[in-house]
Amino acid sequence: MADEKVPTSLAPDHDIEKEISPAFDEKRRMSAPTTRILKHAHDADEAMKAFEGYYGEVMHIDEATNKRLLRKIDLHIMPLMCIVYGLNYLDKTTLSYASIMGIKTDIGLKGDDYQWLGSMFYFGYLAWEYPTNRLLQRLPLAKYSSFNIIMWGLVLCCMAAVKNFSGAVAVRFFLGVFEAAVTPGFAFFSSQWYTKAEQGTRIGFWFSFNGFAQIFGGLLAYGIAVGVQRHGASIAGWKIVFLVTGLLTAVMGVLFLYLMPDNQLNARWLSKEDRRLCIERVRVNQQGIGNKHFKAYQLKEALLDPLTWAFVFYALTADIPNGGISNFFSQLIVGFGYTPEQSLLYGTPGGAVEVVMLIVCGYLGDRYKNRLLICCSGLILSIMGVVLIVALPLSNNKGRLAGYYFTQASPTPFVALLSLIATNVAGYTKKTTVAALYLIGYCAGNIIGPQTFRPKDAPRYVPAEITIICCWGACLLDILFIYGYCRWQNKLKAQIRAQPGYVKLENQEWLDLTDKYVYLFLLADQERFFLKSSAHTSMQGESGIHLFALRVGRKILHRAVLGVVRYNATWKEDMPLPFFMIVADHSTIPTRCKD
């Protein structure tokens, strides 16, 4: 596949191409970076439709209007995504509840059949992940997502009808196929509607409903198990669990189809003016709201970007533990010395730990502009939890159960990296490709994970637990690499913006360019390190949010180390501000940036 050709002439029927045509006439006088931008500027984003007839007009959104729009978006978008994502997790883990409610005996599972049944979901997920990401780009986002939600609910209901291992394998495979669209689709929704500064908190919040689902699912399964045991039922309790959760999901899919807009342009609850304002408020993301055309150069760039493979490595390595724990947590708790019914009930506090960690880390990551380092706290807590499970004797049930609860903090880095894909990867084809590869790694890890919990290792599963510790340790190193790489990339972009002849095109944010070609595009979590140096080189045409962030960042740093650091830090113009230092010499800060 070849890259798109540089247009030799501009088609007269495309407003965006008319818009940038003067820039082509001056191409020879421009810098090389600007020329590279123009090469890919002939296929604009969907957001341009909202600005047809308004070229040259400058829109200003005051704080009150921004808060009003954000409240409206939160009210209409977040409840739907939270509930559906919680059901997404619940539907995957119903098998764990069923494992101690009689499914193994009823459908004749033997040997390692249960491990393969747990992995089969991810084979379907893996097989369909890239095609579904392409369909998310090509088809209306909300409508395609709704179709998948309805279908996975109906497929889950079919699990109640299986009679043998083969039937269960088929159902689990197709369940994975239809659930493959949910996580990337919701990441795209978040990047469409929210600014970078808002995305970490929102993604953490809807992902935290995994924890709420664990609480709800445990209570639901416990209630059904106890009810069937006391009063009897015409069908097995585990079948009731599948029917209830499947039908609930299908109903939510219908509501999602009716209530969720594909993007700002067709949101029925927004006026025409508010639609433009909602698009304008995400201009700062430098990403647009979507482009339905496949671009070969963006696919190539995604495959050659080291950051892509750092994301994939994390997803693969982190989800080996996840695949094991999510399928075996009920049996693991039984191994601590509790009854099957007690394990359903005692598993629910783990969901509360996940909810709290995801919301707190998401908020703090956005608050202090450092999602990567803050999210490491969840991974460290999880490693401590596994160490407790391994080190404590079998007789210490409460201590080992507490260790299990600590492991439920492990999703925090996964969610942080998912939000970084939404914020740091620009260009719609590139974004869908990176998201697909990230979730392919997620699938591969979850396929491997259940195989580490071998029946012969029960009830302690020590080899699996040691594998978990090693995987999470490798994940910490990978996060540090991503952190350093983002910092290095932003420094290079600051140098490019300083080149003579660098020009920012009008409406450049809506040209569906990748993060490689948008030199104003700073990789999240590192923006604050470069605000000072960027102020010297590229203040023209940029919003005041950079100055605001600089002031807030400096105040936070002063408060954090006040009374500890009392020396003047030597500032060099090409050196990013370290996290732990205060620049006491204010003479190097531009007048406009001083408090």
Image: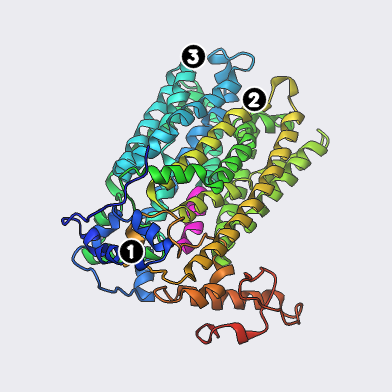
Q: Is residue 548 visible?
A: no
Mark 3 vs mark 1: in front: 1
For mark 1, give the secondary structure.
helix
- Residue in view at x 60 percent, y 23 percent: 115
Task: Give whichever of discs 2 and 3 has the lower sequence position.
Answer: 3
* Residue 418 picture location, percent across and down: 51, 48
Lateral position of residue 299 relative to residue 575, left or right: left
The residue labelled by disc 2 is: 451
The residue labelled by disc 3 is: 166
Residue count near mark 3 (Cα–Cα under 10 Å), binned few <14, some 14–19, many ≥20? few
* Residue 13 picture location, percent across and down: 16, 55
- Residue in view at x 58 percent, y 18 percent: 104
Identify the amino acid type marked 2. Gln
* Magenta residues, start to end: 196-207
* Residue 316 picture location, percent across and down: 59, 37
Identify the amino acid type marked 3. Ser
Q: Where is the C terminus found, in terms of image quarters?
A: bottom right
For mark 3, give the secondary structure.
helix
